[in-house]
Image (cartoon, grey):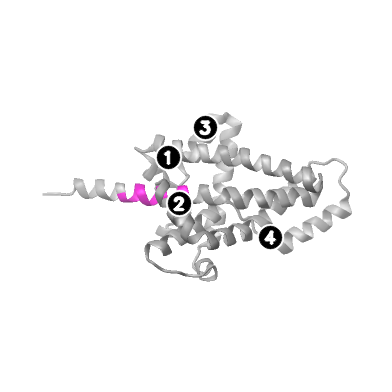
Amino acid sequence: MLAQIWAILRVRWRILVAAAVMISIPVGLLEAIDLELQDPEVDPVRLLEVLVAAFLLGAGVLLGDVLYAGVAAAVVVAERERSDAPLREVLAHLPVLRLIAADLLLGLAVVLGLLLLVVPALVVLTWFALVAPVVKVETPPLRAAFRRSRELVRGHFWLVFGIVIPIVVGSAVLSSSIESGADAVIGESFFGAWAGGVIANVLTAPPFALAVVVLYFELRQSSGAQTAGRVGP
C-alpha cells in the first residue's frame, strides 16, 4: 500500500498539489475566520470584509478533506486507466455536492463522537474513512455511501484504524507546527493564520487522501474476492 501511495504521488504530484491548493485556499480562509470569531475584540467592519472575501473565494461552499479525497480517488482511477486527464477534466466529473454533504456529515459525526469521548470519534472516523472514494467511484446515495464504507471496513477495522488514525494525528501535529511557524515568520495576524492554514493543508491533505483511496481499492478487491469465493454450486 505504501508503494502504491508513493507511486501515485510521484507520477501525479502536480495535479494533487494543484487540487490541494485550490481547496486549501478557501478552507484556510474559513479556518482563519473561525479564529477571528474567537477574538472578543474583533472589529465588526473588518469581520464583514473578511466574510465578503470568504464568500468570493470559497463561493459559499465548504471544501474539505472528503472533497479532496474524492479528487484523489478520481486521480487514482485515471492512473489505473492509464489516463492523463488534466485537473479541469477531473473536477468536471466529480460529484462535488455529494462529497461536500459527506464532508459535513462526517465532520458532524466526529464532533458528536468527541463530545461523547475521544474513542467514539476515532471509531466513527475509522468506519467512515472510505466514504469519499465510495461516493466518487460507486456513486451511491449519500446514506448508502456511509453504509458501504462501514461494510468495507468491517473485518479490517484495525488495519484501517492503524493506517488512518496515525496519519490524522500526524497531520494535526504537523499542521499545528506549520501554523506556529507561519505566526513566527509573518506575525500573529489574520493573513498569517490564513497562510499557515493553506500551507499546512497542502502538505497534509495528499497523504491522508491517497491512503484512504488506496485502502478503498484494496478492501474493495478483497471484498469482491471473498464474495466470489463464496459463490458456487
As drawn, is 118 to the left or to the right of 149? Answer: right
The residue lying furthest to the left in this view is 233
Q: Secondary structure at mark 3?
A: helix
Q: Which residue is mark 1?
A: 160
Q: Position of residue 120 (x, y in %)?
A: 52, 32
Q: Residue at x 83, y 52 (%)?
A: 47
Q: Which residue is mark 3?
A: 120
Tell me, for residue 58, which label it has, or none. Answer: 4
As drawn, is 226 to the left or to the right of 97? Answer: left
Q: Is residue 219 magenta?
A: yes
Q: Is residue 11 shown to the viewer in this render?
A: yes
Q: Which three-letter amino acid code belongs to the residue tagged 2? A: Trp
Q: Are marks 2 and 3 in contact (CB under 8 Å)?
A: no
Q: Which residue is mark 2?
A: 6
Label whose residue precedes the other's in the sequence (1 or 4): 4
Tell me, for residue 108, which label it has, or none. Answer: none
Range of residues picked out in magenta = 211-221
Q: Secondary structure at mark 2?
A: helix
Q: Residue at x 55, y 40 (%)?
A: 168
Q: Are marks 3 and 4 in contact (CB under 8 Å)?
A: no
Q: Are marks 4 and 2 in contact (CB under 8 Å)?
A: no
